[in-house]
Image (cartoon, rainbow, N blue to C red):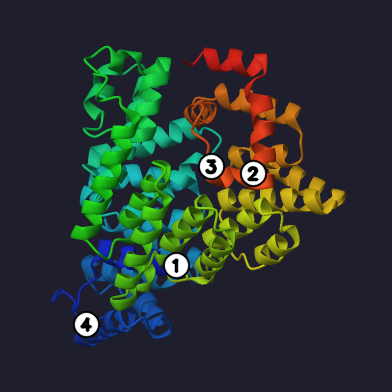
């Protein structure tokens, strides 16, 4: 979550004035408050903060003007001095600052405090719903990622979805909106709220949701309500997802996320060359008219091109594309996602030493991303015979199981620890917050050409060993 994105969103939520209210009692303080506002708007925070802090204590100013002064402090100190920002938020809240829930929300994210973040989101849904409705889908994705990392992730995720619904949030992307509603539906069913779950059912079902509807006992009440075979056709759902994503991209050519979703759908449908051609056309458009740095997602388009090139058995071209993706900025800052993805593909290519060198470029990373880094370390060091380094990565991953159980599963398969992998799979199948993904992983899918790579084939064979165990089959049978 980049600092620039947080500040930009906070500025929108706070709506600091271009000039101050005439309620200030002294003309000099009015002029100084205007000066602080203008300095903050130019991002000259070293100039703005001292003035704003002094004015926040000026009793001759109206509460409204002191709230504006405190807002300047929050905006400027959010990333540089969170403690100062937190103090300004508390003082603003005491003065009934409308921006307080939004400021608490971004401050909690900055401090990686999921509990405070969810509490602030719930408060904003009730008192400042327009702020929640205006969150872009990247922020919503980040929020859900944080919620998944807490011990009681099921309850935390449910609180987020409930807050989004209460505020009337709708994603700008139909594909993203369908995914959000599908997840909320699942959580409602787990709580026995069938009527509400039915009301949240997406109008257009994603392929993943179709898979769950067809296979999970949890969704039986919804299947019984007139779900036709046509609506539960996996391929039809995938085709529709590609069509909708392409339509969204054509309507908003600056939205690289929709283009990447269409490419992912084409790959899932076994049409990788179409994904490559589409991605290259998209990159040409973005090169002519680049989006703002914080909204630039060309790294994900190049990433999808790399994956598609693997699917057409062009491994050299795929590595070149992945390396280019890893060199691109992410949200206007240093790249993390594609550095990890590139290193992971190098491990699958058997280029372990090169993968470890790439991983040295990873900067600040989320707990989820760090788990993928550790998985790549474990797999690469297994190939290189570096037992101590491999085991250190595995120990760290085991301690981070809640952050990313899929990364731990990959590392256990890489190191041929099928007993531990089976135990992990059973834990996932018994965990309400993980069982959908775990159950879906056990389904059988058409083989991909990328499976011809030696390391990919080895992992697939080891996973088959885990899947075919009697205890895994018994655990899965309880779900559908």
Residue 343 visible (yes or no) = yes
**Residue at horizontal 66 percent and vertical 62 percent from the top:** 359
Disc 3/disc 1 C-alpha distance (Å): 20 Å
Percent across and percent down for residue 209 are 36, 30
The local secondary structure at tag 1 comes to: helix
Q: Quadrant of residue 249?
A: bottom left
Nearest to viewer (mark 2 / mark 1): 2
Q: Are marks 2 and 1 in contact (CB under 8 Å)?
A: no
Label 2 to label 3, Cα distance in Å? 28 Å
Q: Earlier in the sequence, mark 2 or mark 3?
A: 3
Q: Which residue is mark 2?
A: 456
x, y (%) of residue 478? 52, 12
Identify the element where label 4 is drawn: helix
Which one is nearer the viewer's eye here, 221 or 226? 226
Q: Earlier in the sequence, mark 2 or mark 4?
A: 4
Q: CA distance from mark 3 to mark 4?
A: 46 Å
Of callouts 3 and 1, the N-terminal one: 1
- Between the residue at mark 2 and the residue at mark 1, the CA separation in whole angstroms equals 37 Å
* Residue 91 appears in view: no
Mark 3 or 4, closer to the camera:
3
Residue where numbered disc 1 is placed: 3
Q: Residues within 10 Å of mark 3 (few under 14, many from 20)?
A: some
Locate residue 85 relative to residue 362 in the image: left or right: left
Q: Which residue is mark 4?
A: 30
**Residue on which the image places disc 3:** 149
Closer mark to the observer between disc 2 and disc 3: 2
Which quadrant of the view contains residue 471?
top right
Q: SS of the residue at dot 3? A: loop
Looking at the image, residue 46 lies above or below residue 471: below
Label 4–label 1 contact, CB within 8 A: no
Q: Nearer the viewer, residue 211 or 460?
A: 460
């Amino acid at each position: 979550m980049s600092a620039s994105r947080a500040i930009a969103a906070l500025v929108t939520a706070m709506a600091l004035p271009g000039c101050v209210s005439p309620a200030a009692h002294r003309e000099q303080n009015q002029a100084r408050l205007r000066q602080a506002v203008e300095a903050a708007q130019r991002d000259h925070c070293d100039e703005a903060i001292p003035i704003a802090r002094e004015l926040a204590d000026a009793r001759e100013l109206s509460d409204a003007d002191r709230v504006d002064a405190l807002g300047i402090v929050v905006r400027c100190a959010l990333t540089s001095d969170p403690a100062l920002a937190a103090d300004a938020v508390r003082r603003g809240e005491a003065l009934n600052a409308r921006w307080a829930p939004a400021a608490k929300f971004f401050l909690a994210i900055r401090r990686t405090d999921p509990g405070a973040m969810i509490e602030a989101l719930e408060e904003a849904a009730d008192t400042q719903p327009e702020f929640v409705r205006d969150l872009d889908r990247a922020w919503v994705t980040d929020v859900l990622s944080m919620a998944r990392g807490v011990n009681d992730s099921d309850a935390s995720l449910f609180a987020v979805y409930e807050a989004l619904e209460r505020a009337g949030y709708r994603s700008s992307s139909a594909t993203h909106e369908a995914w959000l509603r599908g997840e909320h539906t699942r959580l409602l069913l787990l709580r026995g709220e069938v009527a509400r779950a039915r009301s949240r059912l997406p109008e257009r079902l994603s392929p993943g949701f179709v898979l769950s509807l067809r296979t999970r006992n949890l969704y039986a009440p919804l299947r019984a309500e007139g779900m036709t075979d046509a609506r539960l056709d996996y391929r039809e759902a995938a085709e529709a997802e590609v069509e909708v994503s392409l339509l969204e991209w054509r309507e908003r050519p600056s939205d690289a996320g929709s283009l990447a979703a269409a490419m992912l759908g084409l790959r899932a449908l076994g049409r990788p060359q179409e994904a490559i051609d589409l991605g290259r056309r998209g990159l040409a458009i973005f090169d002519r008219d680049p989006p703002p740095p914080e909204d630039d997602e060309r790294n994900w388009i190049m990433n999808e091109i790399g994956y598609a090139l693997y699917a057409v058995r062009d491994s050299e071209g795929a590595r070149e594309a992945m390396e280019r993706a890893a060199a691109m900025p992410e949200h206007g800052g240093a790249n993390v996602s594609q550095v990890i993805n590139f290193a992971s593909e190098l491990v699958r290519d058997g280029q372990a030493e090169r993968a470890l060198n790439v991983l040295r470029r990873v900067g600040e990373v989320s707990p989820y991303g760090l788990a993928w880094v550790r998985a790549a370390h474990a797999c690469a060091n297994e190939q290189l015979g570096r037992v101590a380094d491999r085991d250190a990565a595995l120990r760290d991953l085991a301690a981070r199981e809640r952050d990313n159980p899929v990364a731990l599963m990959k590392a256990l398969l890489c190191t041929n620890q099928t007993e531990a992998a089976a135990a992990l799979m059973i834990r996932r199948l018994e965990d309400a917050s993980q069982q959908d993904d775990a159950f879906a992983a056990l389904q059988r899918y058409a083989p991909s050409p990328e499976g011809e790579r030696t390391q990919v084939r080895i992992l697939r064979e080891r996973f088959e060993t885990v899947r075919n165990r009697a205890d895994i089959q018994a655990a899965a049978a309880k779900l559908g």
